[in-house]
Image (cartoon, grey):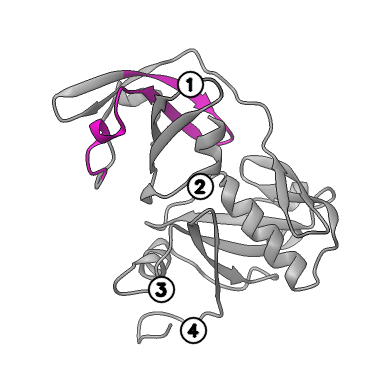
Amino acid sequence: MSTSSTPRITFLKGHGTENDFVIVPDPDNALALPAPVVARICDRRAGIGADGVLHVVRSAAHPEARDMAAEAEWFMDYRNADGSIAEMCGNGVRVFAHYLQREGLVEQGGLAVATRGGIKQVHIAKDGDITVSMGRALLPEESATVAVGERSWPSRNVNMGNPHAVAFVDDLAHAGDLLSAPPVSPAAVYPEGVNVEFVVDRGPRHVAMRVHERGSGETRSCGTGACA
């Protein structure tokens, strides 16, 4: 993609359960990826289109990841579709690992990936399946209310390396069109914004979910949201 105001960027496209990403290889962290450029890349009409950008950087080359370089060679510098910086993306880690393995940069077996949410342990199986140890969910005491139109629901505050507000509803249609972020109050509970999950209990070990991802809008799946 190239215009007079957008640099020429080498990229690939990938998805995990239809949570889709533009992959930008940049081992030496040489690219400037300001928010407006990322937003243009992710625009589904004027750009390539994606839920976010996976910026592939060696940990030693990125100031936010250098202290993790001894344990994790690669840093997933994840950006939301609006260009904002995110701590973690569960499906993104799997796609990130698949890219590294496909390019011969890592082997099958165990792999440590640095993220802003900490180091995530990934396993690449011989059959190509990729699994991630997402870590323990944190349950902060603060809670908030999620609203859509005239309806509102209590939500549970869950941190999976990134923040989530999980609200159980009777019908997923109650979430509306999710074209904009559902208001959460008090907003001070999530000063950096929040991913909002609307969940229906459908029986033992079975729930259905819709998610509005902070900075990206409604997505078809969300790994950290499923864990939350």
Residue designated by label 1: 203
Q: Image quadrant for the N terminus? A: bottom left
Q: What element carries label 2?
A: loop
The answer to which of marks 3 and 2 sits earlier in the sequence is 3
Residue designated by label 3: 48
Label 1 or label 3, whichever lies nearer to me, is 1
In the image, residue 160 lies in the stretch drawn in magenta: yes
The numbered mark at residue 8 is: 4
In the image, residue 153 lies in the stretch drawn in magenta: no
- Please state if 25 lies on the left or on the right of 112 as rendered: left
The answer to which of marks 3 and 4 sits earlier in the sequence is 4
Is the C-beta separation of discs 1 and 2 under 8 Å?
Answer: no
Give how far across and how far down residue 145 sits, in percent.
30, 20
Q: What element carries label 4?
A: loop
Q: Residue, x 46% and y 81% (percent of image)? A: 7
The numbered mark at residue 86 is: 2
The numbered mark at residue 134 is: none
The answer to which of marks 4 and 1 sits earlier in the sequence is 4
**Disc 4 marks which amino acid?**
Arg
The answer to which of marks 1 and 2 sits earlier in the sequence is 2
Is the C-beta separation of discs 3 and 4 under 8 Å?
Answer: no
Choose top left, top right, bottom left or bottom right for residue 117. top right
**Disc 3 marks which amino acid?**
Ile
**How many numbered discs?**
4
Q: Give the range drawn in magenta.
A: 154-178
**Mark pair 3, 2: CA separation:** 20 Å
The one of 129 and 73 positioned closer to us in this rendering? 129
Residue placed furthest toward the front: 203
